[in-house]
Image (cartoon, grey):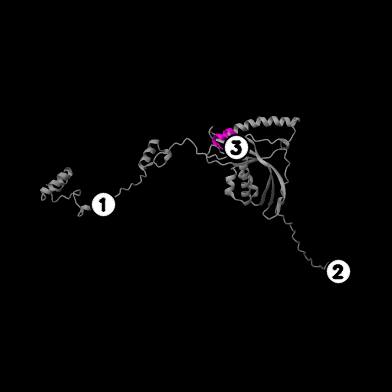
Amino acid sequence: MSLSQWTGLRTLMTPSLVKAIQRNVPAVIAGIQVRHIAKHWAPEFKKLRRLKVQKVKLPNFNEENDVSKLSPDQIRSRMKEEGLLPPRPWMERPLLITATSAVFEPYVPPEGDGKLSALTLGGAKQSMEFLSKKSKSVMAVRKIRNYEEDFSTSDFAEQAQEIYLKAHKALAEKDDDTLHQCVTELCYPLMTDDLKTCTVRWSFLKSLEPPRVVHARCTDLITKDNIFGQVTVRFHTQQTLAVYDRFGRLVFGNEVVAKDVLEYVVFEKHVANIYGLWRIHEKIIPDWMPERDAGKKTYIKQKPVEAEPVADSVVPDTATDKSAAVA
């Protein structure tokens, strides 16, 4: 039998048959070298040698790599090969609303701070408006009590004054961390933008009248359960204020002269949030209140432009000039 015939016979025989022939008739099949029946000299490490071999996936440059040109089934099969999960189709957006962007139904302070006589036409009109607005405020306070059971207008007025003092002390000391806990995101830039390069000296002397709640409103955002509450508190206090610019010059107020201050401050809270805080939201300035004096502005004084001196040119005397001078 020739070598080619033995080679064909070797390909037809199964491994088990080849192994049996080699064991029983070694002289017949001694010339045939079979690779798959070769044994390693240390068979106890066969498993470890098998783990050393890793299949490396080579990139196929003939495949389409542009994802926009692949079909959804091809993308799904590619992701399954890589062991990736398909992205979840989120339908909602994560929003965090901690404060509103304005004062809803702002309180309109009565002219003259409500001291008009009820016998006059203006005083009677103020009394009717006060009764109509008070009913809405009572309903708003009742809704706030659904989320904050211990809420009371008399106790809240004292709490509001503490927040007011804490916020203004933090503003004078430029303590941003404390200020963010006392004012909302709407009020913070209004209080700090003009004072970035200034020094503030502020002090609270006394309360001329006890603070009191004059207005309360509630509103919902996005959903009916997401409720915000706003309470307007009237403050009549005595304070001192002095503002110095970056050069140390006084631009507003005085540290010695005390002034009576009448303010209507709006406090807001996300009452639907159990961790919500009452914070200063805005200040209501009535139309009948006189305007305050404008602060002095500092600027860089421009230097006068000096004219460049013109160089004098010396003209030499000519012969004609000399003859004229002699004559």
| Residue closer to the observer: 25 or 256 | 256
Instruction: Estimate how packed mark 1 is, as few (under 14), some (14 to 19) or many (20 or more) residues with alpha carbons within 10 Å.
Output: few
Q: Residue at x 13, y 46 (%)?
A: 20
Q: What's under tag 3, amino acid-wise?
A: Ser
Image location (x, y in percent) of residue 243: 68, 51
Image location (x, y in percent) of residue 45: 23, 53
Instruction: Estimate how packed mark 3 is, as few (under 14), some (14 to 19) or many (20 or more) residues with alpha carbons within 10 Å.
Output: some
Image location (x, y in percent) of residue 262: 69, 42
SS label for mark 2: helix
Residue at mark 3 to residue at mark 2: CA–CA distance: 113 Å
Which of disc 1 and disc 2 is earlier in sequence? Answer: 1
Q: Is residue 207 left or right of residue 178?
A: right
- The answer to whether residue 273 is magenta is no
Q: What's under tag 1, amino acid-wise?
A: Leu
Q: Which residue is mark 2?
A: 323
- Residue 48's disc is 1
| Residue closer to the observer: 153 or 124 | 153
Q: Which residue is mark 3?
A: 152
Q: What's under tag 2, amino acid-wise?
A: Ser
Region in magenta: 141-154
Residue at mark 2 to residue at mark 1: CA–CA distance: 125 Å
Instruction: Estimate how packed mark 2 is, as few (under 14), some (14 to 19) or many (20 or more) residues with alpha carbons within 10 Å.
Output: few
